[in-house]
């Protein structure tokens, strides 16, 4: 029974890697995909930021919608960085991503956790809680951009 479970687990993990490896048609497709995901992230982040900075009126419902969208989109771009060929260029991604992929993926994981925390804060409707969660979220964005994004 133990051997059967180990075999089933191995088969599942092996097929998951094959699926992930074939999710994109080529490196350009992967780069286009991740850039599209980042565009959605930037749009939703910008709107929340504008509300918290007083550039537009604060609307708790709209913040919630933007935070929900961020939580949905946050997991999307990362697999597109491990597609073969994407390390040779495309967009603003620096070579340092692939040189220190472990750190990069740790930052991606933290980004996703920060997004969930922002979503939870947005559910409260409390502007102070949202602002604190957003500051943490943006701080992680900046840390990643400073190291891994060409400007």
Image (cartoon, rainbow, N blue to C red):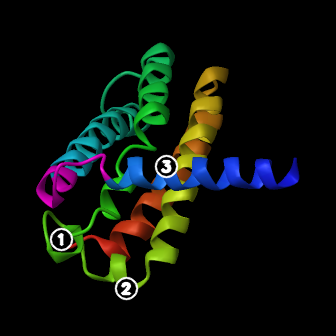
Q: How far is mark 2 from mark 1, CA to CA?
A: 19 Å
Residue closest to the eye, 125 or 22: 22
Q: Is residue 30 magenta?
A: yes
Q: Which residue is mark 1?
A: 151
Give residue 136's position: percent from left, percent from top.
57, 54
Q: Looking at the rendering, which quadrant does residue 95 occupy? A: bottom left
Give residue 56's position: percent from left, percent from top.
31, 26
Q: Earlier in the sequence, mark 3 or mark 1?
A: 3
Residue at 33 percent across and 41 percent down: it is 41
Mark 3 surroundings within 10 Å by alpha-carbon count, few (fewer than 14), some (14 through 19), many (20 or more): few
Residue at 55 percent across and 57 percent down: it is 109
SS type, badge 1: loop
Q: How far is mark 2 from mark 3, CA to CA?
A: 27 Å
The disc label shown at residue 15, or none:
3
Seen from this angle, which residue lies furthest top? 61
Mark 2 surroundings within 10 Å by alpha-carbon count, few (fewer than 14), some (14 through 19), many (20 or more): few
Q: Which residues are magenta?
A: 22-31
Q: Earlier in the sequence, mark 2 or mark 1?
A: 2
Q: Which residue is mark 2?
A: 99
Question: Is 149 left or right of 17, judged from the image as shown?
Answer: left
SS type, badge 3: helix
Q: How far is mark 3 from mark 1, CA to CA?
A: 37 Å
């Amino acid at each position: 029974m133990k051997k059967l479970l180990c075999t089933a687990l191995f088969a599942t993990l092996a097929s998951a890697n094959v699926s992930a490896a074939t999710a994109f048609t080529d490196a350009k497709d992967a780069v286009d995909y991740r850039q599209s995901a980042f565009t959605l992230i930037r749009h939703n982040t910008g709107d929340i930021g504008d509300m918290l900075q007083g550039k537009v009126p604060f609307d708790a419902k709209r913040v919630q919608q933007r935070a929900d969208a961020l939580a949905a989109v946050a997991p999307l771009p990362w697999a597109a960085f491990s597609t073969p060929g994407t390390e040779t260029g495309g967009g603003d991604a620096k070579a340092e991503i692939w040189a220190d992929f472990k750190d990069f993926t740790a930052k991606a994981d933290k980004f996703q956790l920060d997004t969930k925390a922002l979503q939870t804060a947005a559910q409260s409707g409390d502007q102070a809680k949202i602002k604190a969660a957003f500051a943490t979220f943006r701080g992680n964005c900046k840390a990643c951009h400073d190291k891994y994004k060409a400007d």
